[in-house]
Amino acid sequence: MKALLGWSAVIATVVLLGSCSSLPSGVGNVLGSVASGNAGAAASAAAPIGFPSGDVLASRNASPTDGTYWVVKVITPASAATKNQAQVIRVEDGKEYWANYVTPTHKTVQAQLALGAQVFFLPQDSTRSNMNETTYTQDPWQLGRVTSVDDLYKGEVQVNGTDYYIKWTRMAN
C-alpha cells in the first residue's frame, strides 16, 4: 500500500510537472490577453480627440467672425419659424440657448490650409502640444484666418498672427 501511495505521489508529481511545462504558454496567453486589454485601454486613451457624433460649433454672436463658439448639440434646427436661430445645448455646462450660427466642422486637413482660409481654433489651448478631450470639447473656440503656412511641415499653422497646432484646429464642412 505504501508502495502504491509512493508511486501515486511520483506519478502525480510527474503529471504536475508535465503540466507545468505547458503553463508558461497558457500563462503567456492569459497575460497576453490581459495586456491586450490594457493596451486597448491605453490605445483608447491615446485615440484621436474629436467631437462626439452630431456635435457642432455654435455662436450666439451677431457676426460669425467676432465671437465665441461652443461645442453644442442641436435641439431645434434653425428655420424660418425660429428666425433662423437654432436651439442648442452647450456641452460644457448643459445650458440651453438660441444660436445665430451653427457650423458642422471637421478636423483640419493640412492640404486644406491656404492663406486666408478660415479655421476654428482654441485660442487658449491650440498652442499646447497635448490636450485632453474635455478641453477640446468644453473650451471656447474662435474663428480666424490663416495668416501663414510656412510651418506646415512642423504641423503648425499661423492663425490671426499666432502659431497653432493643426491637430487642434477645425474647418467648416
Image: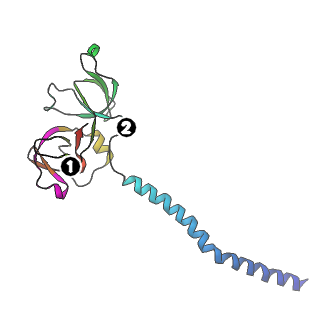
Compared to 145, does 61 lie above or below? above
The residue indicated by pointer 1 is 111
Horizontal side of 21 relative to 130 (left or right) equals: right
Q: Is residue 163 magenta?
A: no
Please give the name of the residue rendered at 22% of the width and 40% of the height, measured from the top-left corner. 171
Amino acid type indicated by mark 1: Ala
Horizontal side of 22 relative to 83 (left or right) equals: right
Compared to 164, does 10 lie above or below? below
Compared to 96, does 68 lie above or below? below
Q: Position of residue 137 (x, y in %)?
A: 30, 40
**Secondary structure category for the residue under label 2:** loop
Amino acid type indicated by mark 2: Ser
Distance from Cα at disc 1 to Cα at disc 2: 24 Å
Please give the name of the residue rendered at 10% of the width and 45% of the height, measured from the top-left corner. 115
Q: Quadrant of the C terminus?
A: top left
Q: Position of residue 153 (x, y in %)?
A: 17, 58
Q: Quadrant location of residue 58? A: top left
Please give the name of the residue rendered at 21% of the width and 50% of the height, measured from the top-left corner. 110
Of all residues, the one furthest to the right in this rendering is 1
> Magenta region: which residues?
143-156
Q: Which mark is residue 53?
A: 2
**Secondary structure category for the residue under label 1:** helix
Which one is in front in this view, the residue at disc 1 or the one at disc 2?
A: 1
Q: How is the image coloured?
A: rainbow
Q: Which mark is residue 65?
A: none
Please give the name of the residue rendered at 14% of the width and 27% of the height, measured from the top-left corner. 63
In front: 2, or 144?
Answer: 144
